[in-house]
Image (cartoon, rainbow, N blue to C red):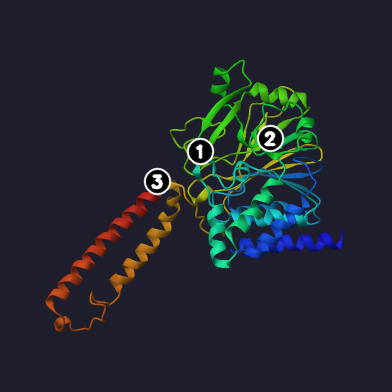
Amino acid sequence: MALAQVDGHSCIVDAVKAVLRGESIETREFLSTLSKATLSREGKGFFEEVSGETVVIGPCRGHAVDLAYCLERYVLARFPNGGVNIVFLGNYVDGGHNSVEVLYMIALAMLSLPCVIPLVGRHEMLYPHHPGGFGSLRRELFLRSLRCGIPMEDMEDIVRCFFSKLPVACTVNKRFFCSSSGLASCYRFVEEIARERFQWRLGEFVQNQPMNEEEDKSNEGYAFVGSHTAAGNCLRYTHNALCNFLLRNNLFTHIGGIEYHALSERSENFMELDRRRESKYLPGWVFGRMRTEPRAPSYIFLFSASHFCDVNRNSGCILTISKSNAMVLQQFDVHAMRPAVMPCEQNHAFAWSYRLLMESVVDIFYNILRSGVAASGRKCPDDKSSFHVEVIRNEDVMKWKYRRMCEMVKSLLLRHQVEKIL
């Protein structure tokens, strides 16, 4: 292994360990790394081909620790010499509050490892507009701009330039087609995709979604049908349209990412309305219907941010493809040392604060009840007769109210525990 590869490998290892420790990436280092990664994409198209053993990682959505855990356990530890391709399925930002750290690790991996293909997702292609109004990257950049004195416009220009250079689709071993979401209605062959020179013209690959079985039956005879979802307009395509695309290009399976929102009653890709909210427990992967020849699922959709936004109980998942085209699906739970994930802007996102808020409030109440501080703020002497009777009465009323509030918080905690068990 060349010396440059050794240095690059050690850089990504150090960065991953720093993120796992909960450290924040320095803003100027982040911008510099992103600019270098953008330059490394100069002259390259928006369609890539890789061959050999490949690890496919689904959307991370601002969960930097989950991405670091994936890289450390399933890539850097298993392939210390870098002898593996890595394909990221887009949608790296807008979810958790560590989108900057996620982008930094991906950009550093592009510079440090032999073959890294970061596909563009809907959240990157549409930046700064957030699909479904759910975004956090821009707020992260704004806070860093205030702290570091770097103009917000300069930071956004670097980020947008990086997003504009990312590829839209790729093939693995000429048998697996990867995109961040679905297929496009205007492209029948992968050669047509490879000839495209404008990223925006390939936008359907980050927007379109497959139909579920009920939709497929009701739209028999059609290939693509217009649809409107919480994340915007798109085309939904039938199982037959997907199989025709795979057969036409001699492909086995389409691999994509799941667009998944915290506490959503349905996955935005294909899952029907779930009255039991089972989407909260999404396993991190979803298989399409099996094809008759070859015997493989028509699609495999992945999601790699376990316990998304610390509200859902979904698992994370990655896919490893061997040189012989054998697929190994690996599911993982939340990393034990992951800090609390704090999403931004979405109404349901405040759910992350319930546990922390209750713990803090209980601590405050207990400290007040056990301390000897009177209502006046002075230290309460042993003999309270020196205090005015009204002050003592007010103190007793306050203590009674605090005790009652503690009981309410305790009952709320117990209720949450019962809901988790049920």
Q: Which of marks 3 and 2 is in front?
A: 2
Quarter where residue 302 is shown:
top right
Quadrant in which the N terminus is drawn: bottom right
Task: Give coordinates of residue 47: x percent, y percent.
Answer: 76, 39
Residue drawn 68% across the image and 28% down it? 298
Residue type at the position of mark 2: Arg
Q: Which secondary structure lies at badge 1?
A: helix
Residue type at the position of mark 3: Glu
Q: Which residue does the numbered mark 3 point to in the structure image?
A: 419
Query: Is 280 on the left or on the right of 368, as rendered?
Result: right
User: Residues under labels 3 and 1: Cα distance?
Assistant: 16 Å
Residue drawn 47% across the image and 33% down it? 274
Quadrant in which the C terminus is drawn: top left
Q: Earlier in the sequence, mark 3 or mark 1?
A: 1
Residue type at the position of mark 1: Ser
Q: Which residue does the numbered mark 2 point to in the structure image?
A: 201
As displayed, is residue 315 above or below residue 76?
Answer: above
As displayed, is residue 258 above or below residue 188?
Answer: below
Q: Are marks 3 and 2 in contact (CB under 8 Å)?
A: no
Residue drawn 85% across the image and 63% down it? 3
Q: Which secondary structure lies at badge 3?
A: helix
Quarter where residue 245 is shown:
top right
